[in-house]
Amino acid sequence: MDPETLRLENCVNSHWRIIKAVKAAILFGPRDLRIENRPLDTSALGPDDIWARTVISAFKIGTDRGNYEGAEQVPGAPDYPRGVGDSNLAIIENVGQNVSRFSPGDRIVTRQMHQSEFVMYQHGSIIKVPDGVDSEDAVYAHLYALSALCYEKAQFRPGENVAVVGVGVLGLGAIALGPLYGARVVALANSDLRLDMAARMGAHAGYLSSDPDLARKLDAFTDGDGIDLVILTANPWPAYRTAVEVVRQNGRVSIVSLQGRGEDPLDFNPLDMAWFYNKGISLIAASGSAGDDYPRADSDVLEADRRAAHVLSLMADGRLEPSRLITHRLHYTEMVKAYDMADLREKSMLGVIFDWQE
């Protein structure tokens, strides 16, 4: 018997139903991540089903690290045990009879968890990868779509000065997209290594957030106009404080991070008048739908997929290369190693790809 086959069951109409064992990354509790065998029936797809085999998946360091550490649960997240990951590139093996937009052999990007195979509904979050786009770029489509939402929801206007606070995967996505959207982008990070990566991804300038001369340097960068929009991708409260301090009077801070997640209680007021009321700034949560000045999709999922499709088009044009940030390529069997490195805040670790080929 095929070692990937769990069992054979007698099925209706005298057909045999094959239940396969697929690999899936399951978190059973804080720092208890295991690669488990899970059953998957691929022999009798529903009319709207798509069966796909994962090629690679990407590690979303900030969010996945918080889950791994056991930080407070994000609202709506399932209890343990639960799957992890949400950036998956796969090749379609077969489709149901009603599926017309996708065909076997198509490459797709989805928000499926880290797993070797899956079956999903054709109208779920799924996008076909254009020919010519490298798989290691395409797997970041949904992550970069989230970076794009930071601009869109904050109603960015071409020509504005943008500071990105937090130079991880999402921050680098915002940096790479900025010049394409017409932004002048400065990166603010806590390590020279991350500033070097920001420069490679297109930042016009980059400074350490702890630089005692930061205010003067930002003033020079903006010719005295100030930072119009800050995109905040880092969770720690000191990063938030940097964001609200450097934004100009009546500027905006687009927040895609989960502020203070897993940290001790605050020793300062995050809405201090000096930073918030007196400056008249806007704090914008980069989640859900874009601002009212933009057309709304039928759902947040459709709008996010539209944004991810736009990101893929930029990759197809050769103007966006997320794979340049990849620092680690690991087999899925080494996944726990990557989570442990993230737990230790390894600064050399940025883009991480898991290979699901046996």
Image: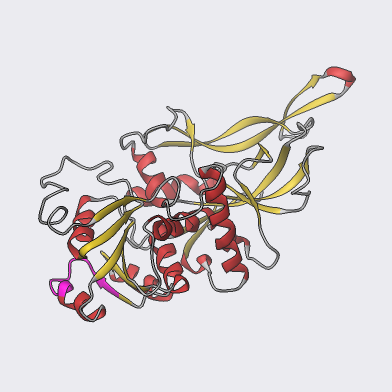
Q: In this view, does 197 lie to the left or right of 88?
A: left
Q: Position of residue 127 (x, y in %)?
A: 64, 52
Quadrant assignment, res 37: top right
Which residue shows up at 22% across the image and 43% down it? 263
Q: Does the magenta stretch include residue 277?
A: no
Q: Which residue is drawn at 44% across and 45% down?
A: 288
State left or right for residue 4 relative to residue 209: right
The residue shown at (37%, 33%) is 75
Outermost residue toward the front in this view: 293
Of 117 and 203, nearer the camera is 203
Residue at the extreme right of the image, as rendered:
14
Q: Is residue 70 above or below residue 228?
A: above
**Residue 219, relative to residue 126: is it above or below?**
below
146 or 1, nearer to the observer? 146
Picture coordinates of residue 199, whole percent (x, y): 38, 75
The answer to whether residue 136 of the structure is visible from this angle is: no
Q: Give the range drawn in magenta.
A: 206-215
Report the side of 204 relative to 9 (left or right). left
Q: Where is residue 240 in the image (x, y as percent from the top left)?
A: 23, 54
Count of numbered circles on the image = 0
Q: Does the magenta stretch include residue 208?
A: yes
